[in-house]
Every structure is written in C-alpha cells, then in structure tokens.
Image: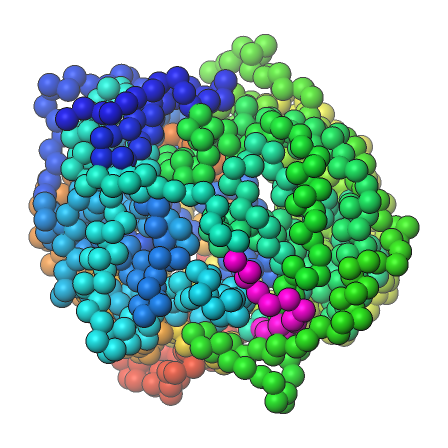
C-alpha cells in the first residue's frame, strides 16, 4: 500500500530549523507528519541492507510516570517540594533537570520519538461509566495480538534507552515514546499495535482500575483539581464538561455493578473512535523521509479507516448559571479568586489571537495595570489571566478565559471591590480603541520566538506537533502557536463584549470557609465542601456599568526590553579548542566568572546564573527567615521591571537556595546587561516599605504553612532534614516569622549585604568582552565588601554509620490526606576521589537495570500505588540510591516490607541477567550519557550544576560514558552486594515513613523490632553522628 498523498513543502518552518518535514495522508484517513532530524544520525543513515542491531523480544512494562532520565535528583534546598498551583515560588523553569553530554569528541546524538493524538477524550465518556476514556488509555498498554505480553512495549523501550507516556484530554488522547535511534522501527511496530489490535485483556482490567484509582488519589487533595471538578459538577446538565473525567474505582466498578459490561464499553469506545480519520501521528527520526514514509505505510495502514475528525465549533451551550458565587473550602492556606468568562470557540482565529491580546492587557503587571492597582490597595499579591492550554479551556464548545487573583486577607474581605476593580479595567479597554501597536509588539515577540525557538527533547516536540495537527491548518502545524498575522480590531471588540457579569462565573477558593453554614454542599467525587451564594444584584449592576474608572488605570507603556540585535557572536569570533567547556575568565576575591560562548545552538540567547554568598544568611533561624523576607520583598519591588522583560522573553529568577541567593537572567541577550544593571541598582538602593512588608510577610506565612502538604514533598523534606547539618525546621521558621517586625528587617538587610561573594556563569550568545562587562556591572554597582572564603556557608551531609538503619516516621500534614509515602535511602559514598566517576556510572547502570522490574513488580503486579520510583540521589556531593512508593491503600510498614522483598529478589534478578540484556542496558545508558542537549537551557543547567556542586567537571557525562565501557555485570552485582543488600556490613539505610490519615503510625513500632533505630529528635541524632567533610 502507498500513501494517498504527501507534501514536503507545505509545512512552514523556522529559517533556523535544520529538520525536514513531510506531511503524509494515508488512505485510511490517518494524517502523519514525518520529521527527518539529521542530528539523530549525524554520521548519516546506515545502509538499510547492513546487519541491524538485534531487537530482542524480552518483556517489560509500561511506565506512565513522568519520563525519568537516569539522573541525579537536584537537592539544593529544603524547599524541594515541587511548586503546586502557584502557591510556592518555582525554582526555575529555564533549567530542566536533565544531565547530558557536553564538549565530547564523540558524536553527540539524539533519540528518536513518536506521538499519536487520537481525536477523542473524556468528553466522550458515557454518563454511566465516567473516566472510561482514561481507562481505555491505560488498557492499550496491556498487550496486542502481535505482542500479547502486557510488558512487551515498555520492556523494549526500557532496554533500548527509551520511555513512554500517555495522557487523556477532553477531546483527544495522546500516546508518545522516545527510544535510542537504532530501535525506532521496532518501537513503532509495537506502538502501532495500540491502534490496530489491542487485546484489552479482561484479566488486566481489575489491576488497571486500581491504577486509575491510584492516579486519582494522587490529586484528591489538590486545590486546583478540586476547583476544576466543582466547576464541572456545577456545569449545566447535559454539557460535556458536566462529568468526572479522571475516573476512579468507584466510577468504574459501579458501572459494572449496575450491569454494564465494562470491557464491552471499552471496546465499543475503541471501535467507534480509534480509526485513521481520528488520528494524527508524528514520527521524528534520523532516517531519510522516504524510509520513515515506508515504515508509516507498512505499520499504520493496518489501522482501520474512518471519517475525518471534525474539530469545528459545536453548538453554543451555556456552561454555568450566572449571578452565582461558589465558595470552595481549600486544602492549603490560600485565598484565590477565580473569574471565568466563556468565549466562542476560537480554533479558527489562531492567526489573530484576540484572546491573547486581551490576556496581555488584563494580566499585565506594569504601571497602570490591574495588578498594580490591587497591590497598591494591599488586596492581592499576584494575578494571571488568559485562556489556558488545557482541553477544558480550549474546547470546540467554547474557550474559557480565566483570571486568577491571589488575594490577601484584606482582599478577601473586600472581594466585591476587587471584582469592581476588574470591571473598571475592562471598561477602560472597552472605551479605548484596540491598539495596533500592542498587537505589533505581540506579533514581533511571536515571530522572534518562532524564528529562534529553542529545541525541545524529541518526545516533547512530537507531542506538541501532534496536538497542533488537531487545531492548526497543515501549513501552520509548527508556526500556529507563534503567529499574529492579522490585526482585526473588530474581532477584539467582539471578544471583549463577552466580558460582562452575566457571562461570568465567580469561584473563591479559601481556607476561610464557614463550616457552620446550613448551605454547605458536597462535590461527590472529591468530597470537597462548597457553598453556592447569590451575588447581590446591586453589585452586578455596578459591574455592568462602572460609575468611574480609577485614574490609576492606563494601558501599558512601550516595552523597552524587546530585543533588536539578533547577531550571533560566534559568527565573528573564531572558535578555539578551549571553547568546548566553560572556562574561568574572572577570578577575583569578589567575583568568579565562568564563560562559554555558544557554538552549538546558534540562537541569540544567553543564560547568566549567579550564586551569591551573603553574610550570615542562614547562620541562625531568625536570619534564615529574614533572608526569605528580604528576597520576597526585593522581588516585589522589582516586579514591574522584571515583568516587562519577561514579556519580551528575557526572564529573571531570584531565590534562596540552601544558604545562598541565586539570581538567574535568561533569554534574548540583547537587553540582558540593561536588565541586570536595573536589578542590581535597585538591590543596592533597596529600602523596604512598611505596607509591602505586611503583605509579603502574610504571603510568606502562608507559604510556610503550605509547605509539606504533599506527601512526596514532605518525605523529601524529612530526608533532607535528617541529612543536612544546617536545616531550619519550617514550623520553627513560622513561629519566628510571626514575631518579626518591620524594624527587624530594616536592621538586617544592610548586614546581610555588607559582605558578598559572587560566582557566576555566562553561557550563550555573548562575547568574552560582554561577559567581562557583566562582572563589572556587579563590581561597579554593588558596594559590598568581599565575603571571606571561611565565612561562606558550606553544606555538610550526615555520615550514617555502616550497618545502621534509621527510621523517621511522621503523620501527613494534611489530616485528610489518604496517601502514605515510604522512601528508603541507601548511602553509597561521598562523590570525591579517583573512583567517583566509576561509582556514579555503576549506580546509574544499576538504576537502568532495575527501574522497569521495580515498576512492574510494585506497581503493575502488586498495585501498591500509582507512584513507584527507584533512582540515584546526589545530596551535596554524597551519592545514594533511593526507592519511593506512594500509596493510598497500604500502610508504610507494609510498603516497606514489599520494597524489602523486592530488594531481596534483586540478587536473583542480577545473577540471571544474560549478557545480551546487560549489554542493551549498558549501551542504552552510554547513549543517554552521550545524547545531545536539546537546547541551550539544558546545557546551561548541566554546567551550572557542576559549579554549584564545586566539582567543575564539565565533561562529566563523557567521562561516565567512557567508564561504562569497562563496567561488567559482576561490577554491578558487587556494587549491589556492598551498598544495597541488607546483609552487607556496609549497608546504610534511612527510611522515611509518612503516614496517611488511614494508616496507624503506631505500626512503626514493628520495625523497631527489626534492627531499625527510630528517631523522634533529629537534633540529638545529628549530635551523636559524624558528618562528611563539606565539598560545596
């Protein structure tokens, strides 16, 4: 069979994109985008008639967790919990946690990848079996006619350096994978069977119902998810949004209990929707397009034919009753106001983007903005606005424009006045003509981002393209999200006309909730309590026609940070052999600066990261809290400048990491020195304001209270609390915070900044002179003295004695949290000396070998919980290995016993590993180590981790890959027998048990009978044990 049609010229790509694209349409209706990336096979595609790498047929298991590199977790600070729902500062989105090869003389390679979007999602769930689409997604991993073993697909990927994932959206479901380049066809063969002949095994259904249930239980205490489900629950009856999209044991088992044959329903949904006309496929490989086309035709022509997907706008159905206020009880300590307006479906207006124009204005943070006004009133601390990227917010039924405002206590009390301010600003927009110059700014930024788009990992790019195929015309599959081609002021006015009170939904998510109210209702799936109130008509009328517009409101000024210089420095400066890795170009008492000009990615971007050691920033509990206050107040002071640069894609991150301040500026390099100078000048002259102090203090108090609400984050926190010599307890920090005054902070800041030391990295499109100038900006702007080396804080990590087993057991912080967590941490060695590289390499190889069997045993077969992980840890240069399980069903003592049982069986697993399988794991890991960084940001993150760890081995991955070539199976077995096997005299374990609300912490006593030392007083423990020497 051949393709129905093909086109190599239709898809518009960036002038800097080196890849080739072919759009392919098969006779069965399937549309495929084939991507030839020459960097995947940099030495050229091998002779197809030559001997292929052996494709083994051993079995494996699907991993639906986030794709994990064989990597070391980054544990720079106690705030290691992943930021959730915008409540805590995110560490830094510019620095993905990915450790890849740099500066190697060996070829740098990428992985191949593929993604399939099927145009059916949770909106297709029958009312009698909610969550069915998500359940179907799970079942497709459970074997096919061609490959009947349910572990086959992921085992193949795991053994060939790959991974897989899938997710269910409202109107589509996406499956994707990545794999070592030589094994793309074998992976595609197994992948294609999802869409040709899945078995949907009856005997796997009960287990996968439990997997879906575990997945749901992970989000049961998420405020964002609870709010989304409340909005769904209170949506108009009969509307597709009025359902429970996650699915859980209750929704699926009750379907069977009511006489529904669940397997028949799954097969019916599959047969009706999984056909060529509903499918958008993306394949990214190093093979020529003709080869990729041949594979696509061979493997995917077997998909049954069907009518083409229709994503055109559906009938306009009202979503919600107007004039209502929904108050939802929050899990975290938060006051969040969410305003939602339903707009027409704008799928076909992507070249005009009227919703983005309005989001830019309503969400602006500069002078004259809505947020600026609310902050001046001390009513809000942050605001975001726009149409989100989720399927709910961008469906064929409607677009939902949301404004989320984080309120202060005062803002909550003045809730209706806050909404009045929103409508004053909306009225300003309605009275002002839409501004073409603002559209032009957005257009310029969009084109700039398209022209110089940073490459993503191949699997992420495949997913993005497959999703884009659903919404954009074929020629705009790549460019559709960036372009602003047509200025239509009348369309902007039309969309703005939907911003009125009768089309607005109001939700308030708050811990301040009247639990005694007689009007309390319960959302049935999450069990969240809420109250539905009528908004007084007087307020609605005042919002319809605001009597006045406050004079503080005005449209934003011209953005001075939009870059104009896109020249590449490497085109005029010859590359020298010393440019492979960063080199130190400034080494003075006050500042040390590492520099590397980009010669790989050729984009006009730079990443400049600075580790700022301050005087006594964490030398005491009080100083630690005052440092947090200072940084948050400084960010608040700088917000208008930082925001303008952010809009122009020049971003700033400022945070407290461990005992240091970390400042990062990253994005287009043209205006970077100007931004840095502005930030440092403001820091030098910074004088706290008492009114902002009270607001920021309230915000920080809330952040401290919300710390450790997630069991997994709580577990990490408790582990670091035991391991780190200096670690200030979050509850003690909260107590101190409550006592601190404005005068305390005013007295502290000059002392904090009186002595500094800066170590930085300039990487990207900067000449050496420009980098040196950046160091001069620090020296000329800051008046501080040099902080002596001996006064700079160094981290020390607990040295657990050989043969010691330490147990720390605590209850979950949120009394309604059902999930328990067990984390078992095995210390290996300090990462120093001539054997350190080999030890890291063997640790990674062990992880590669056992990751899939661990997941298969503990999650798939035993169904302990949705989250099962086994991976290395690097904590301030101490290497370790960690097993983690989170479960809503089992107690920590039982989970510990199952982890122990799995570890007990590892000797047999490792001994029985045949040489061929071992070699697959080893070569796959070497390929991982030598995989080319997808973008400048990834590479900067690699370099920066070496600087922060004070290791300065910038070619670490290359050295590990070299070391792996001589590692044998016996080395891995010896490593396991030395560090992990419980009977080893050198085995050192720290177990963290976090008890969910349904587990009894008294069970912990059972483990004390098994040679575990239970600790309640961490400070006493630290006084009785030694610590490793400080390396960073």
Please say if 653 is above or below 767.
below
Residue 654 is covered by the magenta coloring: no
* Residue 996 seen in this snapshot: yes
Residue 324 is covered by the magenta coloring: yes
**Which residue is drawn at the image coordinates 60% and 27% (left, top)?**
485
- In the image, 103: left or right of 555? left
**Which residue is drawn at the image coordinates 19% and 69% (left, top)?**
261
Residue 83 or 97: which is nearer the viewer? 83
Please say if 562 is above or below 974.
above
**Which residue is drawn at the image coordinates 27% and 35% (left, top)?**
29
Highlighted range, magenta: 317-330
**Which residue is drawn at the image coordinates 53% and 53% (left, top)?**
316
Residue 260 or 11: which is nearer the viewer? 260
Please say if 616 is above or below 146.
below
Q: Position of residue 1018 (x, y in %)?
A: 50, 74
| Image quadrant containing the N terminus | top left
- In the image, 498: left or right of 894? right
- In the image, 962: left or right of 554? left
Please say if 854 is above or below 258.
above
């Amino acid at each position: 069979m051949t393709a129905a049609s093909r086109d190599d010229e239709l898809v518009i790509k960036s002038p800097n994109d080196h890849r080739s694209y072919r759009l392919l349409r098969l006779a069965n209706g399937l549309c495929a985008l084939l991507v030839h990336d020459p960097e995947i096979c940099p030495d050229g595609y091998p002779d197809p008639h030559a001997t292929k790498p052996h494709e083994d047929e051993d079995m494996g298991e699907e991993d639906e967790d986030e794709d994990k590199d064989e990597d070391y977790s980054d544990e720079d600070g106690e705030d290691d919990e992943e930021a959730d729902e915008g409540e805590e500062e995110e560490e830094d989105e510019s620095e993905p946690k990915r450790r890849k090869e740099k500066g190697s003389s060996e070829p740098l390679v990428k992985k191949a990848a593929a993604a399939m979007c099927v145009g059916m999602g949770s909106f297709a769930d029958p009312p009698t079996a909610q969550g069915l689409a998500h359940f179907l997604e799970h079942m497709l991993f459970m074997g096919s006619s061609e490959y009947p073993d349910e572990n086959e697909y992921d085992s193949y990927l795991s053994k060939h350096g790959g991974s897989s994932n899938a997710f269910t959206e409202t109107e589509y479901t996406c499956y994707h994978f990545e794999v070592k380049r030589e094994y793309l066809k074998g992976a595609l063969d197994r992948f294609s069977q999802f869409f040709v002949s899945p078995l949907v095994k009856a005997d796997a259904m009960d287990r996968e119902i439990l997997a879906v249930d575990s997945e749901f239980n992970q989000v049961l205490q998420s405020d964002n998810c609870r709010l989304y489900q409340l909005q769904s629950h209170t949506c108009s009856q009969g509307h597709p949004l009025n359902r429970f999209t996650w699915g859980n044991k209750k929704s699926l088992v009750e379907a069977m209990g009511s006489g529904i044959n669940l397997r028949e329903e799954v097969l019916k949904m599959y047969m009706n929707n999984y056909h060529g006309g509903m499918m958008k496929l993306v394949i990214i490989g190093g093979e020529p397009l003709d080869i990729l086309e041949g594979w696509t035709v061979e493997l995917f022509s077997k998909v049954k034919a069907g009518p083409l997907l229709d994503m055109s706008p559906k009938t306009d159905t009202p979503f919600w009753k107007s004039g209502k206020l929904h108050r939802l009880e929050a899990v975290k300590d938060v006051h969040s106001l969410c305003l939602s307006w339903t707009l027409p479906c704008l799928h076909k207006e992507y070249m005009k983007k009227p919703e983005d124009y309005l989001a830019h204005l309503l969400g602006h943070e500069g002078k004259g903005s809505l947020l600026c006004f609310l902050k001046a009133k001390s009513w809000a601390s942050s605001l975001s606005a726009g149409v989100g990227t989720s399927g709910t917010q961008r469906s064929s039924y409607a677009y939902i424009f949301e404004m989320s405002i984080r309120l202060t206590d005062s803002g909550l009390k003045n809730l209706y006045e806050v909404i009045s301010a929103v409508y004053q600003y909306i009225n300003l927009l309605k009275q002002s003509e839409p501004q073409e110059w603002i559209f032009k700014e957005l257009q310029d930024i969009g084109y700039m981002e398209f022209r110089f788009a940073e490459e993503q990992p191949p699997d992420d790019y495949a997913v993005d393209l497959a999703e884009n195929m659903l919404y954009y015309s074929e020629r705009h599959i790549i460019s559709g999200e960036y372009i602003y081609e047509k200025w239509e002021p009348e369309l902007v006015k039309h969309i703005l006309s939907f911003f009125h009170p009768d089309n607005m939904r109001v939700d308030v998510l708050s811990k301040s909730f009247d639990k005694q109210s007689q009007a309390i209702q319960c959302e049935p799936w999450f069990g969240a309590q809420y109250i539905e109130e009528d908004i007084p008509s007087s307020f609605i009328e005042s919002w319809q026609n605001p009597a006045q517009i406050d004079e503080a409101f005005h449209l934003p000024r011209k953005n001075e940070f939009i870059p104009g210089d896109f020249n590449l420095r490497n085109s005029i400066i010859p590359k020298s052999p010393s440019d492979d890795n960063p080199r130190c170009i400034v080494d003075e008492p006050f500042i040390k600066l590492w520099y590397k000009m980009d010669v790989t990615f050729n984009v006009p971007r730079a990443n400049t990261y600075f580790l700022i050691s301050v005087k006594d920033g964490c030398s005491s509990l009080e100083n630690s809290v005052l440092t947090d206050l200072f940084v948050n107040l400084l960010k608040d002071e700088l917000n208008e400048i930082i925001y303008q640069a952010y809009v122009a894609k020049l971003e700033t991150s400022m945070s407290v990491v461990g005992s240091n301040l970390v400042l990062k500026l990253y994005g287009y390099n043209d205006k970077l020195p100007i931004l840095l100078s502005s930030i440092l000048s403001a820091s030098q002259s910074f004088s706290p304001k008492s009114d902002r102090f009270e607001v920021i203090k309230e915000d920080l108090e809330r952040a401290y209270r919300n710390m450790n609400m997630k069991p997994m984050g709580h577990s990490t926190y408790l582990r670091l609390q035991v391991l780190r010599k200096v670690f200030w307890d979050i509850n003690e920090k909260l107590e101190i915070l409550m006592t601190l005054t404005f005068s305390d902070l005013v007295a502290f800041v000059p002392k904090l900044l009186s002595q500094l030391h800066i170590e930085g990295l300039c990487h990207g499109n900067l000449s050496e002179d420009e980098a040196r100038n950046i160091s001069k900006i620090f020296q000329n702007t800051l008046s501080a003295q040099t902080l002596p080396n001996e006064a700079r804080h160094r981290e020390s990590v607990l040295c657990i004695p050989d043969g010691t087993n330490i147990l720390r057991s605590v209850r979950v912080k949120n009394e309604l949290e059902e999930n328990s967590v067990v984390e078992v941490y095995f210390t290996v060695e300090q990462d120093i000396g001539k054997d350190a590289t080999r030890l890291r390499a063997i640790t990674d190889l062990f992880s590669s070998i056992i990751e899939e069997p661990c997941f298969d045993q503990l999650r798939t077969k035993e169904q302990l919980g949705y989250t099962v992980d086994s991976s290395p840890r690097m904590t301030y240069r101490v290497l370790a290995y960690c097993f983690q399980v989170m479960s809503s069903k089992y107690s920590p003592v039982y989970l510990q016993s199952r982890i122990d049982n799995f570890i007990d069986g590892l000797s047999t697993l490792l001994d029985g590993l045949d040489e061929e399988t071992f070699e697959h794991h080893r070569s796959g890991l070497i390929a991982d180590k030598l995989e080319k960084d997808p973008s400048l940001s990834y590479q900067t993150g690699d370099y920066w981790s070496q600087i922060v760890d004070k290791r300065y081995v910038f070619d670490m991955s290359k050295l590990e890959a070299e070391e792996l070539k001589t590692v044998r199976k016996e080395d891995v077995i010896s490593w396991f027998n030395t560090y992990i096997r419980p009977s080893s005299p050198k085995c050192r374990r720290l177990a963290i048990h976090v008890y969910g609300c349904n587990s009894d912490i008294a069970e912990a006593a059972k483990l004390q009978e098994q040679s575990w030392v239970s600790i309640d007083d961490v400070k006493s423990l630290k006084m009785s044990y030694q610590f490793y020497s400080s390396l960073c």
